[in-house]
């Protein structure tokens, strides 16, 4: 997630929001009450037998607590500055049975009880993870499809508006709308759905660059335990995950640990002053990653980068506070167990506290060993990118994140498509970036992409050149890693972020009542859009059914004269990908690829189904990538 810089006047106008002083004197006269407990429930049989309950309500922190349930022990009750909070540390023995118990709080003659449920773990799929065999499709729920118009807006929310004619307001897309199109994803060859955040964003409209904007993007949480009811709510989301799993589709949830929305319930009544990072005056993050990895960097620069806020309406959480860290970690586990998601994409990964992120990652991996975790660290070089995943470099801090979004290869692909070939230019960039894969513990776990919700759309960046479009998609779907496609790329959706992000987050045509065109169907797409859709479909389907292509080894050859050749192979199959990035057709001689072509005499172009009777010389059209499944001469 990336935001445009705020004007100085706007930042000053909201500066006081970063100093959220607590005033508890008026509360002291109130009787105690318990209005919520987080996590909202838990489960028996978890590997980690520790659980910390956040108990909240007027003067809830003034009560003395007890719990009486076989196998559950209240180890400690913690108080904080704000008397409205208590934190209860429990242990849940392995032998504990599912059921409900009372959390009892007493202060003199006042005695309160709050029922709490320990559930049995179900056997439904969860934490299945992602591998290089998967193909992710990124969906912005509010802009994809409206499956239930009744949940478009609510008068009791801080932002009660919905208007598709306004690019800055909510448009009404929801989880049911995504579920209604599961067949579309299957047809395209997708195996996993990544949804931009679905958690409640009960934010007021905020002034960003002179425009009042809604939090339709989802990155400003206001209640970690509630799926936004404008998207359908908890039960609809749970059923969506079940429906996706029934179709063989995995679900990736977007996590935001670094910050929350200014309207979050625990921001409006903070447990303590150190719940968020605070400065004497409003301080925005610098967005500069260098102080994190720089052995010569200053602490001052590091502090601004790590502890500064993204915007005045997104408070930056202090993850070095163990209560904050516990809250976030337990919520992540609760989400996986409750909804059954398979993987996490982590927003603004590099802005989070390192030790916290390792603890959170490990807690998830302990409970769900196969789960995949890949964060957003928007950097511009391989060494910096490796710092935020498991790597082979002797950094002072070692990350345990299994994967990461591959921003460096994204930049390389853009250069490969838009620059003329040179020693360090054009497709040489792609080769050089992949040549540095030794820095990663496992580069196959990196998630690759051509664009996303924060970027200019791919088709526009390449000048709406359909040949380049197919080249880039071929690289995405045939090189190493886990490919991810932004919604609409398969039907040539385009635009630059001018004047705002909304231009690259337009509604998917056909997803909303009254749409003049329905791009979910072949009949609703024009000839070029169908050609694009069918290109992605054919290559993605072949990839899904060909282990050598999605999980085999990668061998690449140094590009020469604009020609770039690499192979994906295993013991049973070898695929050659040859790209001609020049403007002229080339008869490519293949002698220098002998170590991978040895024993193969012919092949098949899987994109055109055309046979190649000989591999000695291969005709590669201008601005074209061909994908050839190699074959040996038949003994018949």
Image (cartoon, rainbow, N blue to C red):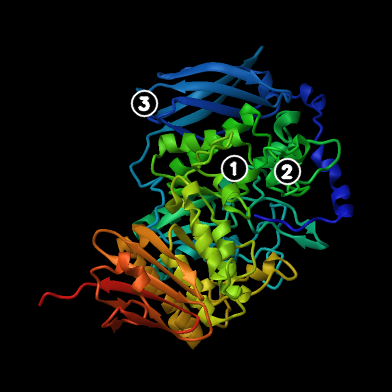
Q: Nearer the viewer, mark 1 or mark 2?
A: 2
- Secondary structure of the residue carrying numbered label 3: loop
Counting labels gives: 3
The residue lying toward the viewer, choosing from 335 and 293, is 293
For residue 543, side relative to residue 151 (left or right):
left
The quadrant holding residue 588 is bottom left
Which quadrant of the figure contains the N terminus? bottom right
Give the label on residue 97, or none. Answer: 3
Q: Are marks 3 and 2 in contact (CB under 8 Å)?
A: no
Q: Which residue does the numbered mark 2 point to in the structure image?
A: 305
Give the label on residue 459, or none. Answer: none
Measured in 3D between alpha carbons, the distance from the residue under mark 3 to the one under mark 2, in whole angstroms, is 46 Å
Dot 1, how many residues are within 10 Å of its Cα: few (below 14), some (14-19), or many (20+)?
many
Dot 2, how many residues are within 10 Å of its Cα: few (below 14), some (14-19), or many (20+)?
many
**Which residue is rendered at x = 35% and y = 40% of the image?**
122
Q: Is residue 130 above or below residue 550?
A: above
Sequence-wise first label, 1 or 2: 1
**Which residue is rendered at x = 35% and y = 57% of the image?**
551
Return the residue found at the far top: 108
The image shows residue 100 at horizontal and vertical percentages of 44, 28
The residue lying toward the viewer, choosing from 421 and 58, is 421
The image shows residue 354 at horizontal and vertical percentages of 60, 36
Q: Nearer the viewer, mark 3 or mark 1?
A: 1
Measured in 3D between alpha carbons, the distance from the residue under mark 3 to the one under mark 1, in whole angstroms, is 27 Å
The residue lying toward the viewer, choosing from 93 and 536, is 536
The quadrant holding residue 521 is bottom left
- Secondary structure of the residue carrying numbered label 1: strand
Sequence-wise first label, 3 or 1: 3
Give the label on residue 224, or none. Answer: 1
Q: Is residue 113 above or below residue 144?
A: above
The residue lying toward the viewer, choosing from 347 and 599, is 599
């Amino acid at each position: 997630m990336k935001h445009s810089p705020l004007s100085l006047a706007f930042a000053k106008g909201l500066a006081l929001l970063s100093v959220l002083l607590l005033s508890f004197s008026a509360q002291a006269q109130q009787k105690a009450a318990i209005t919520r407990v987080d996590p909202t429930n838990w489960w028996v049989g978890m590997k980690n037998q520790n659980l910390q309950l956040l108990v909240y309500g007027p003067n809830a922190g003034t009560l003395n607590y007890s719990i009486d349930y076989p196998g559950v022990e209240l180890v400690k009750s913690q108080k904080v500055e704000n008397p409205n909070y208590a934190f209860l540390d429990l242990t849940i023995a392995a032998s504990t049975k599912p059921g409900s118990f009372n959390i009892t709080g007493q202060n003199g003659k006042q005695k309160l009880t709050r029922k709490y449920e320990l559930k049995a773990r179900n056997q439904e799929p969860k934490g299945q993870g992602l591998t290089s065999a998967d193909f992710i499709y990124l969906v912005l729920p509010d802009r994809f499809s409206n499956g239930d118009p009744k949940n478009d807006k609510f008068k009791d929310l801080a932002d009660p508006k919905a208007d598709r004619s306004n690019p800055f307001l909510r448009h009404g897309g929801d989880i049911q709308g995504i579920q209604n199109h599961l067949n579309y994803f299957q047809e395209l060859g997708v195996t996993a759905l990544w949804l931009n955040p679905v958690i409640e964003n009960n934010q007021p409209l905020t002034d960003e660059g002179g425009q009042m904007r809604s939090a339709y993007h989802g990155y400003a949480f206001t209640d970690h335990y509630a799926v936004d009811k404008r998207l359908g709510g908890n039960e609809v989301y749970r059923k969506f995950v079940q429906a996706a799993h029934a179709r063989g589709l995995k679900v990736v949830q977007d996590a935001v640990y670094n910050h929350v929305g200014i309207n979050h319930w625990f921001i409006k009544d903070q447990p303590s002053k150190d719940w968020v990072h605070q400065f004497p005056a409003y301080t925005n993050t610098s967005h500069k990653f260098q102080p994190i990895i720089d052995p010569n960097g200053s602490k001052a620069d590091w502090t601004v980068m790590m502890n500064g806020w993204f915007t005045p309406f997104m408070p930056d959480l202090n993850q070095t506070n163990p209560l904050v860290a516990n809250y976030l970690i337990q919520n992540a586990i609760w989400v996986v167990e409750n909804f059954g998601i398979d993987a996490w994409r982590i927003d603004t990964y590099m802005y989070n506290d390192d030790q916290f992120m390792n603890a959170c990652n490990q807690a998830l991996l302990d409970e769900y060993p196969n789960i995949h975790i890949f964060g957003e660290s928007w950097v511009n070089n391989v060494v910096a990118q490796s710092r935020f995943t498991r790597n082979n470099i002797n950094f002072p801090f070692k990350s345990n994140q299994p994967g990461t979004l591959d921003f460096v290869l994204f930049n390389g692909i853009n250069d490969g498509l838009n620059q003329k070939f040179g020693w360090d230019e054009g497709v040489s960039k792609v080769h050089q970036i992949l040549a540095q894969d030794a820095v990663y513990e496992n580069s196959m776990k990196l998630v690759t992409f051509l664009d996303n919700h924060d970027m200019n759309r791919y088709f526009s960046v390449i000048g709406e050149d359909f040949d380049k479009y197919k080249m880039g998609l071929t690289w995405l779907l045939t090189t190493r890693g886990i490919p991810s496609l932004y919604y609409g790329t398969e039907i040539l959706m385009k635009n630059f972020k001018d004047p705002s992000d909304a231009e690259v987050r337009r509604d998917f045509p056909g997803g909303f009542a009254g749409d003049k065109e329905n791009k979910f169907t072949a009949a609703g797409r024009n000839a070029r859009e169908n050609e694009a859709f069918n290109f992605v479909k054919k290559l993605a389907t072949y990839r899904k059914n060909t282990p050598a292509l999605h999980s085999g080894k990668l061998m690449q050859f140094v590009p020469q004269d604009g020609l770039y050749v690499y192979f994906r192979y295993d013991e049973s199959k070898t695929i050659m990908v040859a790209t001609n990035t020049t403007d002229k057709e080339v008869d490519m001689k293949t002698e220098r690829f002998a170590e991978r072509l040895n024993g193969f005499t012919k092949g098949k172009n899987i994109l055109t189904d055309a046979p190649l009777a000989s591999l000695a010389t291969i005709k590669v059209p201008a601005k074209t990538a061909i994908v050839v499944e190699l074959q040996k001469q038949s003994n018949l």
